[in-house]
Image (cartoon, grey):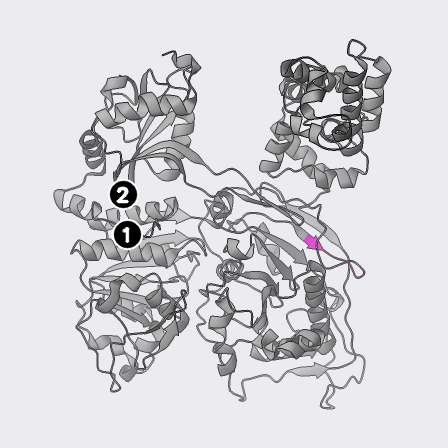
Amino acid sequence: MNKKLLSERDICTKFIIPAVKQAGWDEMSQIREEVSFTKGRIIVRGKMVTRGKAKRADCILYYKPNIPIAIIEAKDNYHSVGDGMQQGLEYAAILDIPFIFSSNGDGFVFHDRTGTSAEKESNLALDAFPAPADLWARYRTWKGLTPAAEQIILQDYFDDGSGKAPRYYQCNAVNAAIEAIAKGQDRILLVMATGTGKTYTAFQIIWRLWKAGRKKRILFLADRNVLVDQTMVNDFRPFGAAMAKLSIGTKTIERADGTEIELTTALDKKRRIDTAYEVYLGLYQAITGPEERQKLFREFSPGFFDLIVVDECHRGSAAEDAAWHEILTYFSAATQIGLTATPKETEYVSNIHYFGKPVYYYSLKQGIQDGFLAPYKVIKVHIDRDVEGYRPEKGQLDRDGIEVDDRIYNQKDFDHTLVIDDRTKLVTRKVSEFLKESGDRYQKAIVFCVDTEHAARMRQALINENADLVQLNSRYVMRITGNDAAGCAEIGNFIDPEAKYPVLVTTSRLLSTGVDAQTCRLIVLDRAIGSMTEFKQIVGRGTRVHEDTKKFYFTIIDFRGATSHFADPDFDGEPVQIYEPGENEPITPPDNVPRTNGGDDTIYPEPGDDETVMIDPEPPDGPEKQKKIYVDGVGATIVAERVEYLDENGKLVTESLRDFTKTALKKRFASLDDFLRRWNAAERKQSIIEELAAEGLPLDPLIEEVGKDLDPFDLICHVAFDRPPLTRRERAENVRKRDAFTKYGLQARAVLDALLAKYQDEGILNLDDPRILQISPFSSMGTPLQLIKQFGARADYEQAVHELQSALYQEAA
């Protein structure tokens, strides 16, 4: 067998995998081929949404399921044996795999990231692939694992037989946490972006420790009832009868599959605890409080729990003066795991100081690049009153007939101390315009307001702006705040992808964290957000992808300048388009505005105030509460428009689409000569266009901006390298003037002329695709077979078409 004639896949199947199996690896449980471990980045350009290519490893070897230990990158036999190593090293770093192999079917190059081998990189014969026990022994030595620690690390993941498996980063997080605990670490911090499955990750950690007998009694702490209930019926469901909620009243709730379940509770009406359960879930505020009688957690002995998992630990649980901190202190002997999307670092509180440095970190930016999280657009709207401030006229009276203090009121005052209803109406009008212009007025949206009173006024204004849909169903617009029982009762429906209503919800802080709103497509910010922690949490309300409803990205409309956090070096998200419409401009961003790639995501410190609000009650009236001033008839308008992007360093810059594309293309092609070589060497010119689109650079929006009927070749040369362009018509005419096809018969020339016209009129580049001969005008000239025969054999036809394509770009050769 001549290996040179075999494809890469044949090399893998016929030589590499047999060598691995011969070394003792089990084909069913330890070997996986062509493993796609990312989804492929979602690329949004106007209304067009595409996915980039997923990262795929040729072969991954697992010591046990979900414990990857080696990766093999295969190449065909035209390549040398080590040509796959660079790619293997890149993938191994992402997947946290210690051993990398490259092969072309002749042998292996072996790279040992652990440093336990005599050589960092060595050559192995095809029949010398190491056995599973050999690689695991090296791994065990590298990690310094004792037999007891090894037993915990090798405990199985939960598998319900449905085929659901953890994503690669979830495996990384679970394995890192288990390893740290197995080696005696008792404070663990996991940082994972909102929407990446922190609770499912926590479940797998708890399950493995529980099944291994290392942790027998577990407490899972959250700060929202809905989070505990969702956790019990979804991710933690396999714990079954061993699990209970630290709550008095039972509650029947609906699972995702439509069936109902009654939550088991561990408290009776006298607040006595049933200590027979093994896994407890509770609210911080349900088991503690300022008064001693409220400190229910003291009913447990300090050593009762072996493991405590703290969900959303950024919101004050680690602050030494926080009420919740006493729970963690009381159970200090337990292993404690903190879960957060936003590790808190300020002068006053530090999660990292309490829990230690994260054992695993998966950022919002990485989640977007991998395609697991949704990218987003930002619309910045500046209102004149916010920009210029408001000074009342002399003698100006408020709604109650009281004279308004003569001073300049600014954005910080609006809806805190001074209410301008016209401003609120303007906000709701712009939001409603966006919904109408988008073509989907039923896309779920959250409007974040200053407080519950502001949320009530916003609700009323949205109702008036959308009276037609409210007439169909009164739940189209609702307020969901802590002091509104009717609104809180609708949280489940709002986050349910199957429930149509409510659609637009106004809130203050209740929905800013934790709520799994998979189909939320619009976030409106009409309050300042001083904390980076809270800003990341709010952005996280929209980052979940929901493919069933074709939700691949979302939009933020910012009326208060909150999105200036994007320029903060502590923001680790993917930079986005930022559009600022003027007074007479549409609220919907233009379709031809690109997204850019972000900078580093390795900075952890979190500036800003600590956010510890769990409910949002209306504060009681009293001498310390300042009454709001309501001023009517003031008016408000939208001011200047500007389009901004975040550059690679996370800085806001004003840049045109043309400038952006020029910069991006010059990174792709080092010079004009480099591009010309690539273009002329490509048999399918369309393949270059497809590659650019897959990397987030589709050329259609740029064609619209340039405003000329240019070939993609001329577009790239003109925009990136300032070369004078030719239109498609000019290129086609140049070919006709050369009369380059006199050697062909009349009908063959007619086919070539028609292909040239297709290129000229429609910009078709894949002229060598024989399917083009099935459409007009070719269908009236004969069958594809008949037309091809005019050139001789099929190879002759293809040669003629390639000559035509070369003639089109002759001066570029």
**Is residue 607 visible from the viewing direction of this image?**
yes
Question: In the depicted view, which residue is nearer to us: 791 or 236?
Answer: 791
Residues shaded magenta: 579-584
Disc 2 residue type (three-letter): Pro
Q: Pointers 2 and 1 in contact (CB under 8 A)? A: yes
Q: Which residue is mark 1?
A: 159
At which x and y percent is residue 490?
Answer: 50, 75
At which x and y percent is residue 693?
Answer: 62, 36
* SS for dot 2: loop
Q: Number of callouts in the render?
A: 2
**Residue under the point 71% across and 64% down:** 436
Left/right of residue 776 with respect to residue 43 in the rendered view: right
**Residue under the point 40% across and 55% down:** 197
* Residue occupying the far left of the picture: 147
Q: CA distance from mark 2 to mark 1?
A: 10 Å
Q: Which residue is mark 2?
A: 65
* Residue occupying the far top of the picture: 743
Question: In the depicted view, which residue is nearer to us: 520 or 740?
Answer: 740
